[in-house]
Amino acid sequence: MGLVVEQRVTLPHRDLPGADWADSYSVRLDRNDLVPMEVASELMGRAPRWVAALLKIRNVIVGFFGLKSAELELTGQDRIGGFPVLTHDDRHVLLGFNDKHLDFRIIVAVEPEGARHQHVSLTTLVKRHNLFGRIYILFVTPFHRLIVKTFLKRFAASRSVSRLSA
């Protein structure tokens, strides 16, 4: 339990039809009570300090190019982790926005496996608009993957402990 695995993403994807870059990671939990909006809030709203520091550096750099900043914080019903909630249902939350260099979506999914397990996944879809979008993704991808895996590992660890102590 708590092992983060990479999943295959098929493009085009219904949540961002023009996406030309994607990745997805998931973790299997011995639970059956997780709710996607709560999972998204916990995953995206409580970042480790090093992630917050990287995001501040990113925001300073992209500010010079007139791009949108991103904040990892709980910001209300219509935003999670600074990202607008575009849609949600009983299995998925779709976050994201469009910018000059790229459009992106984050899908937080909670899928059942039998009666006693659930998979939590984070899928990222990106539609790059120009050369800057391609260069941006090239540079942020290693950090992005580390951050996503860290979020899922922390979530799995926190949910395992809370389940055992319940």
Image (tube, grey):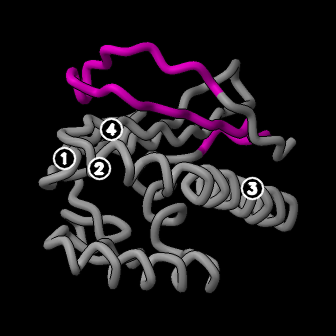
Secondary-structure class at tag 4: strand
| Pointer 2 residue | 95
Q: Earlier in the sequence, mark 3 or mark 1?
A: 1
Q: What amino acid type is highlighted by mark number 1?
A: Leu
Secondary-structure class at tag 3: helix
How far apart are the two marked residues, 4 and 1, measured between alpha carbons? Answer: 15 Å
How far apart are the two marked residues, 1 and 2, measured between alpha carbons? Answer: 5 Å
Residue 55 on image: x %, y %: 45, 77
How far apart are the two marked residues, 4 and 2, measured between alpha carbons? Answer: 12 Å
Q: Which mark is residue 126?
A: 4
Secondary-structure class at tag 1: strand
The nearer-to-camera label among 4 and 2 is 4
Q: Residues within 10 Å of mark 1 (few under 14, many from 20)?
A: some
Q: Residue at x 18, y 68 (%)?
A: 67
Q: For this rendering, which residue is in front, 81 or 146?
A: 146
Q: What amino acid type is highlighted by mark number 3?
A: Lys
Q: Earlier in the sequence, mark 4 or mark 2?
A: 2
Q: Which mark is residue 98?
A: none
Residue 38 on image: x %, y %: 46, 58
How far apart are the two marked residues, 3 and 4, measured between alpha carbons? Answer: 23 Å
Q: Are marks 3 and 4 in contact (CB under 8 Å)?
A: no
How far apart are the two marked residues, 3 and 2, measured between alpha carbons? Answer: 20 Å
Task: Tell me: residue 35, above or below residue 78.
Answer: above
Q: What amino acid type is highlighted by mark number 2?
A: Leu
Q: Earlier in the sequence, mark 3 or mark 2?
A: 2
Q: Earlier in the sequence, mark 3 or mark 4?
A: 4
Q: Earlier in the sequence, mark 1 or mark 2?
A: 1
